[in-house]
């Protein structure tokens, strides 16, 4: 049974969402502020976190940043704001997806299922266990990445993005192609979502993110992973 943590200070929303998720077969815990959320995350094991942006004690962006320092658990940001900057900032610091309030509960559950499908798919064995490109090693079956022997912690979405490009070194992907392949056709995001995740990947796998060796930009077209000897 998947364990989901809802972090939101709106009692009515939490009650309704908890009931809906439990009807779908999930085990649900809740927290009404950022500090309580971190305590529960530290004490338990969750398969996904639904995290409100605006929280008392500690805001959702700070919680997300703290969680990402020690865990790759999928995070969906819940935000009542229409400001795209907050959405993109959430993605840059570690959120896997976002949905804007008021939202349709069925849509949120669909997003959650999609995240779980991708995580489960990454855990299944592949014909080719490891992709090696220079100092970069992508271990597909175990969902691990190493750079020059150093382990790198990636979220499921980050890993899927890197794996997609690593499977075909030198192939240039447009942002829309990456959205379709990594997020799926149902995703409501835009090109900036891909840019945010590429920046996150570069921060983690590149020796110098400002001068990337692996993930290259084809200006005006998209991104590719450079083939290396």
Image (cartoon, rainbow, N blue to C red):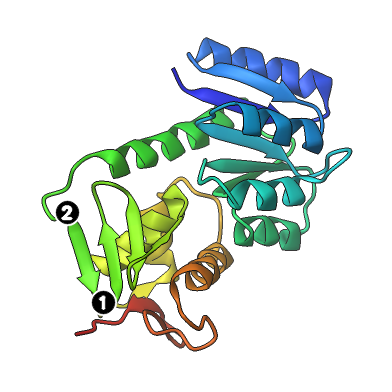
78 vs 29: above or below? below
Tell me where residue 47 appears, x and y as whole percent.
Answer: 50, 31
Q: Nearer the viewer, residue 34 or 80?
A: 34
63 vs 210: above or below? above
In terms of secondary structure, where does tag 2 sit? loop
Q: Residues within 10 Å of mark 1 (few under 14, many from 20)?
A: some
Give the residue number, with chain letter if any, for mark 2: 129
Q: Nearer the viewer, residue 24 or 103?
A: 24
60 vs 177: above or below? above
Tell me where residue 163 appears, x and y as whole percent.
Answer: 31, 60
Question: Looking at the rendering, which quadrant does residue 120 occupy?
Answer: top left
Q: Residues within 10 Å of mark 2 (few under 14, many from 20)?
A: few
Q: Is residue 62 left or right of residue 110?
A: right
Give the residue number, with chain letter if any, for mark 1: 171
In terms of secondary structure, where does tag 1 sit? loop
Q: Is residue 98 visible?
A: yes
Tell me where residue 70 appears, x and y as whole percent.
Answer: 57, 48
């Amino acid at each position: 049974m998947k364990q989901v943590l809802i972090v939101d200070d709106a009692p009515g929303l939490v009650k309704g969402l908890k009931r809906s998720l439990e009807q779908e077969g999930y085990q649900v815990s809740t927290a009404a502020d950022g500090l309580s959320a971190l305590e529960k995350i530290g004490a338990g094991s969750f398969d996904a976190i639904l995290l409100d942006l605006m929280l008392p004690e500690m805001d959702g962006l700070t919680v997300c940043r703290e969680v990402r320092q020690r865990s790759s658990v999928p995070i969906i940001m819940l935000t009542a704001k229409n400001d795209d900057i907050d959405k993109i900032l959430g993605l840059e610091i570690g959120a896997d997806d976002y949905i804007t309030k008021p939202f349709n509960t069925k849509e949120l559950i669909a997003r959650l299922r999609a995240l779980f499908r991708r995580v489960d798919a990454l855990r299944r064995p592949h014909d080719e266990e490891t992709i090696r490109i220079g100092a970069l090693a992508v271990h597909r079956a175990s969902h691990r990445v190493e750079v020059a022997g150093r382990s790198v912690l990636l979220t499921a979405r980050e890993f899927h993005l890197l794996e997609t490009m690593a499977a075909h070194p030198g192939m240039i992907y447009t942002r829309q192609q990456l959205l379709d392949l990594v997020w799926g056709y149902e995703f409501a995001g835009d090109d900036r979502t891909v840019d945010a995740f590429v920046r996150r990947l570069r921060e983690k796998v590149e020796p110098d993110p400002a001068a990337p060796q692996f993930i290259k930009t084809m200006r005006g077209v998209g991104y590719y992973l450079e083939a290396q000897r």
